[in-house]
Amino acid sequence: MFTKQGPSVRELAVQALSSTERGYDLLAPKFDRTPYRTPDRVLDAVTRAVRELGPFDAGLDVCCGTGAGVGVLRQLCRERAVGVDFSAGMLAEARAAFPPGGEGPAVHWVRADARSLPFAPVFDLALSFGAFGHFLPAERFGLFAEVHGSIRPGGRFVFPIGAPPPVGSRAYWSLFGFDAAMRLRNALWRPSFVMYYRTFPLGGVLEDLTQAGFAVRLLPLTELGPRPDGSPRARLVVATREG
């Protein structure tokens, strides 16, 4: 992360002591040169899996950041792709990455909080990558309800979710330590910066999606490989609006 192209230690420290929104405004110009950007192999695996569920006309990238998910929607949707995010800095980078014109569906950008989406039910596909750690567990149902209200009956809300690392593994303790540090930071410093890795367990996610009005199924993303026990390393959550 600390390369000439990525953010410096000082820049990350300033970001971490800012609010979530301001932090991402500051990080935006270098975001795509950090490990926080969703890897292309994940984007490609999701694109191929979701294509089998189509066709789609209009798509929504929830918490679009610099627009990686909009790039997926441009491959899947025939008419329109919309990215929504609350960070003006991230949206500025997304606009620069996808200039107007050219082939493919029309692209639009909207600045809004995902907890209060300004859309009628006009989309038949919504997706999101890497954003759910910015929502507290108590906010999860409300977020899903907002997405439900933005897609048509029969529309899909999809996102990848990784299997948790084995308890006691290096990855387990790394994520545990990061979340503990963020909780301490937010207890001692204001404004808060909400970013956690262990607040989006599959069981709670499925329950909240169901309560929000979705019928949910899981598809293995086999391209991303298996865990040592043979189970998928990642799955695609496919939530369909029932009515």
Image (cartoon, grey):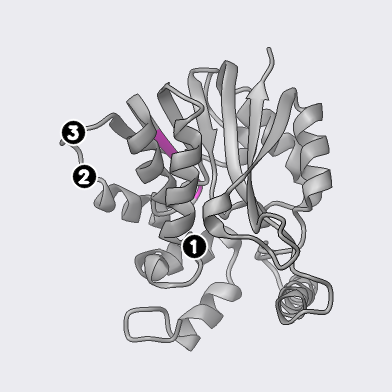
Along the line of sight, which residue is nearer the eye, 48 or 193? 48
Q: Which residue is mark 3?
A: 103
Q: Label 1 vs label 2: CA separation?
A: 21 Å
Name of the residue lying farthest toward the left: 102
Nearer to us of marks 2 and 3 is: 3
Mark 1 or mark 2: whose residue is earlier in sequence? 1
Asked if the stretch drawn in magenta spans residue 3, the answer is: no
Q: Is residue 111 above or below residue 12?
A: above
Query: In the rendered picture of this protein, how many numbered marks are placed on residues?
Result: 3
Q: Which residue is mark 2?
A: 99
User: Residue 40, position in %: x, y?
Assistant: 41, 58
- The quarter in which the N terminus is drawn is bottom left
Q: Is residue 121 above or below residue 198?
A: above
Given the image, on which type of amino acid does mark 2 rest? Pro
User: Residue 128, position in %: x, y?
Assistant: 54, 44
Given the image, on which type of amino acid does mark 3 rest? Glu
Q: Which quarter of the figure has residue 190?
A: bottom right
Task: Judge left or right: residue 101 versus residue 154.
Answer: left
User: Residue 34, position in %: x, y?
Assistant: 44, 72
Question: In the rendered structure, which segment of residues is drawn in magenta?
Answer: 82-86
Q: Label 1 vs label 3: CA separation?
A: 30 Å
Q: Label 2 vs label 3: CA separation?
A: 11 Å
User: Residue 35, position in %: x, y?
Assistant: 48, 71
Q: Is residue 100 above or below residue 18?
A: above
Task: Judge left or right: residue 171 versus residue 20.
Answer: right
Nearer to us of marks 1 and 2 is: 2
Task: Judge left or right: residue 195 versus residue 95.
Answer: right
Q: Is residue 20 above or below residue 75?
A: below
Q: Tag on residue 24? A: 1
Along the line of sight, which residue is nearer the eye, 49 or 140? 49
For the residue labelled by badge 3, is the local secondary structure a helix, a strand or a loop?
Answer: loop
Which residue is rendered at x = 66% and y = 63% of the image?
195
